[in-house]
Amino acid sequence: MRYLTWDNAFSTGIRAIDDEHRLLVQMITQLQRAQVTGTIDAEIARVLRALVDYVGQHFGHEEAIMAQIDFAEIESHKVLHQEFAQKLVAILTNLREGKTLKASELLDFLAHWLTGHIIREDGKIGRAFRERQSKLSSVAERP
Ligand SMILES: [Fe+2]
Ligand SMILES: [Fe+2]
Protein backbone atom coordinates (compact mmCIF):
# COMPACT_ATOMS: atom_id res chain seq x y z
CA MET A 1 0.00 0.00 0.00
CA ARG A 2 1.26 3.45 -0.86
CA TYR A 3 1.25 5.79 2.16
CA LEU A 4 -0.84 8.86 1.65
CA THR A 5 1.14 12.09 1.82
CA TRP A 6 0.17 15.71 1.39
CA ASP A 7 0.22 16.92 -2.18
CA ASN A 8 -0.03 20.53 -3.31
CA ALA A 9 -2.93 19.49 -5.53
CA PHE A 10 -4.93 19.14 -2.28
CA SER A 11 -4.58 22.83 -1.48
CA THR A 12 -7.83 24.80 -1.75
CA GLY A 13 -6.20 28.09 -0.78
CA ILE A 14 -8.53 28.44 2.23
CA ARG A 15 -6.17 28.11 5.17
CA ALA A 16 -8.58 26.69 7.76
CA ILE A 17 -9.83 24.07 5.30
CA ASP A 18 -6.32 23.13 4.18
CA ASP A 19 -5.23 22.71 7.81
CA GLU A 20 -8.15 20.36 8.43
CA HIS A 21 -7.42 18.41 5.25
CA ARG A 22 -3.78 18.09 6.34
CA LEU A 23 -4.91 16.57 9.62
CA LEU A 24 -7.25 14.15 7.81
CA VAL A 25 -4.39 13.06 5.54
CA GLN A 26 -2.17 12.56 8.63
CA MET A 27 -4.84 10.46 10.33
CA ILE A 28 -5.11 8.21 7.30
CA THR A 29 -1.32 7.88 7.11
CA GLN A 30 -1.33 6.96 10.80
CA LEU A 31 -3.85 4.21 10.09
CA GLN A 32 -1.83 3.02 7.11
CA ARG A 33 1.31 2.78 9.23
CA ALA A 34 -0.50 1.06 12.08
CA GLN A 35 -1.60 -1.85 10.01
CA VAL A 36 -1.14 -2.44 6.35
CA THR A 37 -2.38 -6.01 6.23
CA GLY A 38 -4.89 -8.17 8.03
CA THR A 39 -8.13 -7.15 9.67
CA ILE A 40 -9.05 -4.17 11.79
CA ASP A 41 -8.17 -4.51 15.47
CA ALA A 42 -9.21 -2.45 18.49
CA GLU A 43 -6.47 0.15 18.08
CA ILE A 44 -7.20 0.79 14.44
CA ALA A 45 -10.93 0.96 15.25
CA ARG A 46 -10.20 3.64 17.87
CA VAL A 47 -8.26 5.82 15.41
CA LEU A 48 -10.98 5.19 12.86
CA ARG A 49 -13.66 6.48 15.25
CA ALA A 50 -11.55 9.60 15.90
CA LEU A 51 -11.25 10.06 12.14
CA VAL A 52 -15.02 9.73 11.70
CA ASP A 53 -15.61 12.36 14.42
CA TYR A 54 -13.13 14.70 12.84
CA VAL A 55 -14.60 14.21 9.37
CA GLY A 56 -18.00 15.22 10.80
CA GLN A 57 -16.56 18.41 12.31
CA HIS A 58 -14.69 19.21 9.13
CA PHE A 59 -17.77 18.77 6.95
CA GLY A 60 -19.73 21.09 9.27
CA HIS A 61 -17.02 23.72 9.02
CA GLU A 62 -16.76 23.43 5.26
CA GLU A 63 -20.54 23.69 4.89
CA ALA A 64 -20.56 26.87 7.03
CA ILE A 65 -17.93 28.40 4.73
CA MET A 66 -19.93 27.40 1.63
CA ALA A 67 -23.02 29.06 3.11
CA GLN A 68 -21.08 32.22 3.91
CA ILE A 69 -19.86 32.67 0.35
CA ASP A 70 -23.22 31.61 -1.21
CA PHE A 71 -21.51 28.72 -2.95
CA ALA A 72 -23.72 27.67 -5.88
CA GLU A 73 -23.18 23.90 -5.42
CA ILE A 74 -23.67 23.82 -1.67
CA GLU A 75 -26.63 21.40 -1.74
CA SER A 76 -25.02 18.79 -3.99
CA HIS A 77 -21.77 19.13 -2.03
CA LYS A 78 -23.64 18.48 1.22
CA VAL A 79 -25.15 15.33 -0.31
CA LEU A 80 -21.63 14.05 -1.11
CA HIS A 81 -20.64 14.67 2.53
CA GLN A 82 -23.77 12.89 3.81
CA GLU A 83 -23.21 9.86 1.59
CA PHE A 84 -19.63 9.51 2.76
CA ALA A 85 -20.59 10.00 6.43
CA GLN A 86 -23.27 7.29 6.05
CA LYS A 87 -20.70 4.89 4.61
CA LEU A 88 -18.38 5.57 7.54
CA VAL A 89 -21.18 4.93 10.03
CA ALA A 90 -22.00 1.65 8.25
CA ILE A 91 -18.34 0.60 8.47
CA LEU A 92 -18.22 1.39 12.20
CA THR A 93 -21.47 -0.53 12.75
CA ASN A 94 -20.05 -3.54 10.94
CA LEU A 95 -16.94 -3.42 13.11
CA ARG A 96 -19.01 -3.12 16.28
CA GLU A 97 -21.00 -6.16 15.24
CA GLY A 98 -17.77 -8.10 14.99
CA LYS A 99 -17.60 -8.29 11.21
CA THR A 100 -14.04 -8.41 9.98
CA LEU A 101 -12.89 -5.96 7.43
CA LYS A 102 -9.64 -5.87 5.54
CA ALA A 103 -7.71 -2.84 6.80
CA SER A 104 -6.00 -2.31 3.46
CA GLU A 105 -9.32 -2.17 1.59
CA LEU A 106 -10.82 0.27 4.06
CA LEU A 107 -7.76 2.53 3.99
CA ASP A 108 -7.66 2.49 0.20
CA PHE A 109 -11.32 3.52 0.18
CA LEU A 110 -10.75 6.35 2.70
CA ALA A 111 -7.64 7.67 0.97
CA HIS A 112 -9.23 7.44 -2.46
CA TRP A 113 -12.51 9.12 -1.48
CA LEU A 114 -10.92 11.92 0.52
CA THR A 115 -8.25 12.86 -1.97
CA GLY A 116 -10.66 12.67 -4.90
CA HIS A 117 -13.21 14.78 -3.06
CA ILE A 118 -10.62 17.36 -1.97
CA ILE A 119 -9.24 17.77 -5.48
CA ARG A 120 -12.51 17.67 -7.44
CA GLU A 121 -15.03 19.19 -5.05
CA ASP A 122 -13.33 21.16 -2.28
CA GLY A 123 -11.12 22.85 -4.86
CA LYS A 124 -14.27 24.47 -6.29
CA ILE A 125 -14.97 26.06 -2.89
CA GLY A 126 -11.47 27.55 -2.94
CA ARG A 127 -12.04 29.05 -6.39
CA ALA A 128 -15.45 30.46 -5.38
CA PHE A 129 -13.87 31.87 -2.22
CA ARG A 130 -11.18 33.69 -4.23
CA GLU A 131 -13.72 35.03 -6.75
CA ARG A 132 -15.76 36.36 -3.86
CA GLN A 133 -12.69 37.96 -2.29
CA SER A 134 -11.65 39.67 -5.51
CA LYS A 135 -15.20 40.97 -6.05
CA LEU A 136 -15.24 42.35 -2.52
CA SER A 137 -11.87 44.00 -2.89
CA SER A 138 -12.80 45.58 -6.22
CA VAL A 139 -15.94 47.01 -4.58
CA ALA A 140 -13.83 48.28 -1.68
CA GLU A 141 -11.34 49.93 -4.02
CA ARG A 142 -13.98 51.74 -6.07
CA PRO A 143 -13.91 55.48 -5.33
FE1 LIG B 1 -13.05 18.89 2.77
FE1 LIG C 1 -16.16 18.76 0.97
Image: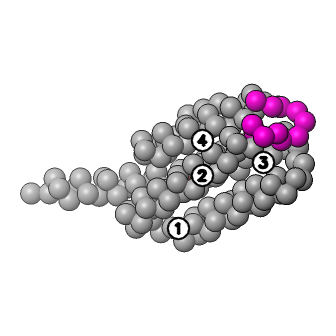
Dot 2 falls on a residue whose secondary structure is helix
How would you rate the neighbour count of disc 3 (Cα within 10 Å): few for under 14, some for 14-19, many for 20 or more? few
Mark 2 or 4, nearer chain start: 4
Determine whether, in the image, residue 101 is placed left or right of residue 45: right
Of helix, strand and loop, which mostly describes the magenta segment? Answer: loop
Q: Nearer the viewer, mark 1 or mark 3?
A: 3
Q: Are marks 1 and 4 in contact (CB under 8 Å)?
A: no
Mark 4 residue type? Leu
Vertical relation: 68 (above or below) 57: below
Q: Which residues are drawn in magenta?
A: 34-44
Q: Which residue is mark 2?
A: 53
In the image, residue 29 lies at what x, y percent?
68, 32
**Quick one: label 3 or label 2, which is nearer the N terminus?**
2
Kindly report the distance in space between the C-alpha atoms of the residues bearing marks 1 and 4.
23 Å
N-terminal label among 1 and 4: 4
> Mark on residue 73?
1
